Image (cartoon, rainbow, N blue to C red):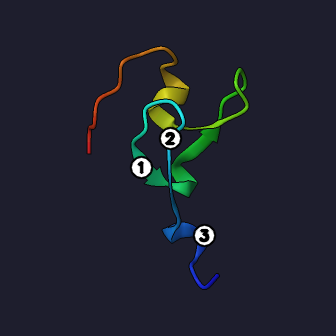
Amino acid sequence: MDENYESLETECSNCGITYKLQEMKISPSSNLMVCVNCFNFPGSKIKRIR
């Protein structure tokens, strides 16, 4: 694997939007990686905001 940690991307398990890995957080309730938006506002309907 030649990629740097900063350039890796993954999909949020809640909203399905792709984010950089360093922007992801671990949800305490589901123990899954979610984006910062889903982490800060659980249960909200998040649309693509990029």
- Vertical relation: 43 (above or below) 48: above
Horizontal side, residue 24 vs residue 41: left or right: right
Amino acid at the residue labelled 2: Cys
- Tell me the quarter of the picture where residue 29 sits: top right
Q: Residue furthest bottom?
A: 2
Q: Residue 40 at x, y = what percent? A: 51, 25
Mark 1 vs 2: CB contact within 8 A: yes
Horizontal side, residue 49 vs residue 16: left or right: left
The tag earlier along the polypeptide, 2 or 3, is 3
Name the mark on residue 29. Answer: none
- Vertical relation: 2 (above or below) 40: below
In the rendered image, the quadrant that contains the C terminus is top left
User: Disc 1 versus disc 2: distance between alpha carbons?
Assistant: 6 Å
Residue denoted by label 1: 18
User: Disc 1 versus disc 3: distance between alpha carbons?
Assistant: 15 Å
Name the mark on residue 12. Answer: 2
Circle 1 residues within 10 Å: few <14, some 14–19, many ≥20: some
- Residue at the image point whose x is 52% and y is 18% from the top: 42
Amino acid at the residue labelled 1: Thr
- Vertical relation: 22 (above or below) 35: below
Q: Residue 45 at x, y = what percent? A: 36, 18
Residue denoted by label 3: 5
Q: Residue 27 at x, y = what percent? A: 66, 30
- Residue at the image point whose x is 72% and y is 25% from the top: 28
Amino acid at the residue labelled 3: Tyr
